[in-house]
Image (cartoon, rainbow, N blue to C red):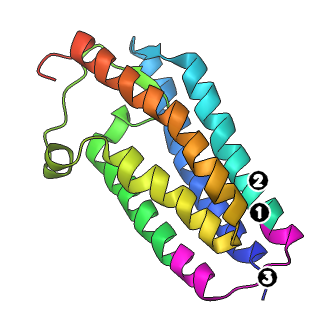
Amino acid sequence: MSIIPIFSIAFCIRLVSLYISIRNEKRLKAYGAREYGKMNSIVLTLFHISFYGMALGEGIRNHRQVNEFTFIGITLFSFSMMMLFLVIRELGALWTIKLIIAKDHVVNKSMLFRYIKHPNYFLNVLPELAAIGLICQAWTVMLIGLPLYCIPLGIRIYQEERIMKEQVKGY
């Protein structure tokens, strides 16, 4: 069995989160929220899309079929999506894929955010990319792409920490 249908389902699930992000971004900006780190957001988006595309390309080029790695990837992807939608639920209208700070931004003090710093990145994004790599059995993309992805992700975390400390009371 081909990996393409499984990859396609994963991709479509991710599109749902993109829709939520765009909706929240429009609403936030309409109420005066400000975006920070625009260039890094673009770079992260390009890396994310490239990772997906290159993983699928490597899987197709190497004629990968569904096997035990695919099922491990599906399990990891399911976990990462549960974490994504938990983060979205916790942050509500504040959640976007961009670094946007609302005028009345409130620090989330839920258990998830108290115990895990940046759960969206560490419980969703990195596991998601590893899962896509496993689903596609894209070993080269994982070996090179994941460390490269960590560069703009590290920059995003640094930016987010700095901006939150400067702009958000109680952070």
C-alpha gap between disc 3 and disc 2: 16 Å
Local secondary structure at mark 2: helix
Name the N-terminal-most of marks 3 and 2: 3
The amino acid beneath tag 2 is Gly
Q: Nearer the viewer, residue 22 or 135?
A: 135
> Is there any visible trace of residue 110 in the rendered image?
yes
Residue indicated by mark 1? 56
Question: Is residue 71 shown left or right of residue 155?
Answer: right
| Label annotation for residue 74 | none
* Quadrant of the rendered image containing residue 121: top left
- Residue 53 circle label: 2
Marked residue nearer the N-terminal end (3 or 1): 3
Q: Secondary structure at mark 1?
A: helix
Is mark 2 in CB contact (under 8 Å) with mark 1?
Answer: yes
- Closer to the camera, 171 or 65? 65
Secondary structure state at the residue bearing disc 3? loop
**In which image quadrant can residue 5 be found?**
bottom right
Q: Taking 37 as reference, is 80 above or below it?
A: below
Q: Amino acid at mark 3?
A: Ser
Q: Which residue is identified by label 3?
A: 2
The quadrant of the image that shows the C terminus is top left
Q: Residue at x 60, y 18 (%)?
A: 39
**Which residues lie in the magenta part?**
59-74
Coordinates of residue 136 in the picture (x, y in percent): 70, 70
In percent of width and height, residue 143 lies at: 63, 56
Q: Main secondary structure of the magenta part?
A: helix
Q: Residue 85 location in percent, x, y?
A: 39, 56
Q: Is residue 71 magenta?
A: yes
Q: CA distance from mark 2 to mark 1?
A: 5 Å
Give the camera-side residue of 114 and 148.
148
Of the pair 55 and 104, the residue shown nearer to us: 55
